[in-house]
Image (cartoon, rainbow, N blue to C red):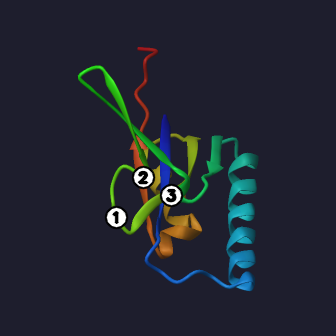
């Protein structure tokens, strides 16, 4: 079963220094390599900062663009993993091992299976 693990980082926390950032990226690299080797990784990417986003809305046939994310909140999506695992329990196990789960939140959401 496929799940999207959305990594929401707390943007209200102070920026990490270079050493802390390098350590965090090393943790991510190790985790990513592990789920590649287990065959559970389908895809995933780190996203640019929320201030680079553009939100698009269409109302009454007219497009409206807004700089920045859709919602003003301290937690913003910083990246994601798409995994294919045996069940929700395994997806939750992986989510809790994502480094940013310690300071933010990882939302686990099942992908709709259209093959049925």
For mark 3, give the secondary structure.
helix
Question: Which of the numbered marks, if any, corresponds to residue 52?
Answer: none
| 57 versus 106 height, above or below | above
For mark 1, give the secondary structure.
loop
Mark 2 neighbour density, 10 Å: few (under 14) some (14–19) many (20 or more): some
From the top left corner, tell me how far across and down residue 57 is, in percent: 34, 34
Residue behind mark 3: 50
State yes or no: discs 2 and 3 in contact (Cβ < 8 Å): yes
For mark 2, give the secondary structure.
loop
Q: Quadrant of the C terminus?
A: top left
Query: Which quadrant of the view contains residue 23?
Result: bottom right
Distance (Cα) linking label 2 and label 3 = 6 Å
Question: Which of the numbered marks, if any, corresponds to residue 73?
Answer: 1
Distance (Cα) linking label 3 and label 1 = 11 Å
Query: Which quadrant of the view contains residue 27?
Result: bottom right
Query: Which quadrant of the view contains residue 40?
Result: top right
From the top left corner, tell me how far across and down residue 72 is, in percent: 33, 61
From the top left corner, tell me how far across and down residue 62 is, in percent: 32, 24
Mark 1 neighbour density, 10 Å: few (under 14) some (14–19) many (20 or more): few
Q: Residue at x 65, y 40 (%)?
A: 43
Mark 3 neighbour density, 10 Å: few (under 14) some (14–19) many (20 or more): some
Work out whether residue 111 or residue 9 is closer to the camera in this orientation and state it.
9
Work out whether residue 19 or residue 100 is closer to the camera in this orientation and state it.
19
| 34 versus 84 height, above or below | below
| 18 versus 52 height, above or below | below
From the top left corner, tell me how far across and down residue 60 is, in percent: 23, 22
Residue behind mark 2: 69
State yes or no: discs 3 and 1 in contact (Cβ < 8 Å): no
State yes or no: discs 1 and 2 in contact (Cβ < 8 Å): yes
Disc with the residue nearer the chain's start (2 vs 3): 3
Given the current orientation, which residue lies at the most extreme left position? 60
Disc with the residue nearer the chain's start (3 vs 1): 3
């Amino acid at each position: 079963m496929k799940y999207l693990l959305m990594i929401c980082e707390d943007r209200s926390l102070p920026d990490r220094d270079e050493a802390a950032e390098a350590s965090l990226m090393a943790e991510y690299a190790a985790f990513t390599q592990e789920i590649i080797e287990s065959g559970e990784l389908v895809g995933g990417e780190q996203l640019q900062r929320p201030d680079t986003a553009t939100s698009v809305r269409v109302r009454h046939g007219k497009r409206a663009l807004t700089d920045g994310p859709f919602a003003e909140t301290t937690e913003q999506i910083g990246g994601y993993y798409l995994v294919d695992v045996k069940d929700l329990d395994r997806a939750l196990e992986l989510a809790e091992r994502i480094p940013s789960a310690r300071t933010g939140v990882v939302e686990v959401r099942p992908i709709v299976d259209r093959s049925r």
